Each structure stands twice: as C-alpha cells, then as structure tokens.
Image (tube, rainbow, N blue to C red):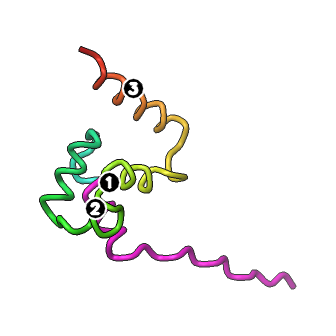
Amino acid sequence: MLVRMPSPTPPKPTVSELELLRILWQPGPATARQVHDAIAAERPDLIHKAFSGSGKALILAALRGHVSAGERAEIKAILDADKAP
C-alpha cells in the first residue's frame, strides 16, 4: 500500500506583502516611479519602514526570484523604452 505524504504548505504572505502585491498587480504594466507613487499614496510609511525610503529596493524585493525569463525580457523592454528620447 502506497501512502502519500502531504506536500508542505508554502508560507503565507504577510499583510504588507499582500498590500504590495495588490499595488503591483492593480495597474498592470507600470514604471518603478508609478509603483512608487501608488504605494506612497496608499501607505506612505511602507517604503520608509520596510525599504529605508528606497523605491528601487522595494521593486527589487518584489521581483527577486519571482520572475520568469520571459517576464524579465518584458521588464527590460519596458525599462529600455523609458530610456529612449
């Protein structure tokens, strides 16, 4: 008789992580500045409290390890388009 072991339950995101994800998902594609402004409008203490005031650190924390190669290419294209005059 084969006994299946239950698979480990992944950790649940914290309230702050859920708020950040909601802000990231809401507008769809957005620049780092747009995400920063949206977070600042909703909860001005989040960036200062969790990321020492750095929008860059916030975006990197949200993206690190959670993006596919295709998503990385899409993000790079968006960032490159912002550089164009």
Q: CA distance from mark 2 to mark 1?
A: 6 Å
- Of the residues under marks 2 and 1, which one precedes in the sequence? 2
- Of the residues under marks 1 and 3, which one precedes in the sequence? 1
- Of the residues under marks 2 and 3, which one precedes in the sequence? 2
Tag of residue 47: 2
14 relative to 74, above or below: below
- Callout 1: 10 Å neighbours few (<14), some, many (20+)? few
4 relative to 81, above or below: below
Looking at the rendered structure, the kind of residue marked 1 is Ser
Looking at the rendered structure, the kind of residue marked 2 is Ile
Image check: 3 left or right of 76?
right
Q: Label 2, secondary structure: give it.
A: helix
Span shown in magenta? 1-24
Q: Label 1, secondary structure: give it.
A: loop
The residue labelled by disc 1 is: 54
Residue 34 drawn at (x, y percent): 20, 44
- Callout 3: 10 Å neighbours few (<14), some, many (20+)? few
74 relative to 23, above or below: above
Which residue sits at x=33%, y=60%? Answer: 21
Q: Label 3, secondary structure: give it.
A: helix
The residue labelled by disc 3 is: 77
Depth check: 14 or 25 in front?
A: 14
Depth check: 82 or 25 in front?
A: 82
Residue 26 drawn at (x, y percent): 23, 53
Residue 42 drawn at (x, y percent): 15, 63
Which residue sits at x=17%, y=54%? Answer: 38
Quadrant location of the C terminus? top left
Looking at the rendered structure, the kind of residue marked 3 is Ala
Which residue sits at x=35%, y=30%? Answer: 79
Q: CA distance from mark 2 to mark 3?
A: 25 Å
Image check: 31 left or right of 9?
left
19 relative to 82, above or below: below
